[in-house]
Amino acid sequence: MDVKVANGDIAMTASGDYLYITDIEEAVQRVRISALTMKGDFVYDRELGTDYRGLSADDEMLCEKLDMLIKESCADICDTQVKVQSCENLIAVIRVSYRNNETTTEVDLSGILQ
């Protein structure tokens, strides 16, 4: 179980209680956070995130390299597998599999890759 993050903020009910997520929704949130965080940038956990150093937006093998890097950064997320299905205009479409559930999420990397 994890606290839901929406638009960069902790999501809360109208009465001020935290909203919690589980299962595939939790896995997707963790994948998104890992993919959107440059490794070393989060002060409280320098190992969180993806190491995009040396990767450029015009790389011929961008999708393959993103797949490898994001898989590596998400390796510690329990029962979760990821696969970058496509990446056009710096929008990566990531398939997230958690136990017997599967979904896709889009991640905009334009603020990370140049």
Image (cartoon, rainbow, N blue to C red):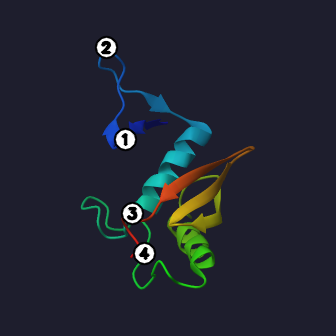
Q: Which residue occupies 39% across, 76% down?
A: 114
Q: Which mark is residue 15?
A: 2
Of the image marks 1 and 4, the number of the one nearer the N terminus: 1
Q: Amino acid at mark 3?
A: Leu
- Find the distance from the CA under tag 2 to the CA under tag 4: 39 Å
Snapshot quadrant of residue 33: bottom left
Q: Secondary structure at mark 4?
A: loop
Q: Position of residue 89 (x, y in %)?
A: 52, 66
Helix, strand or loop under label 3? loop
Separation of residues labelled 1 and 4 (CA atoms): 23 Å
Amino acid tagged 2: Ser
Q: Nearer the viewer, mark 4 or mark 3?
A: 4
Determine which of the numbered discs, if any, sits on residue 48 in the image.
3
| Residue 80 seen | no
In front: label 3 or label 2: 2
Secondary element at tag 1 = loop
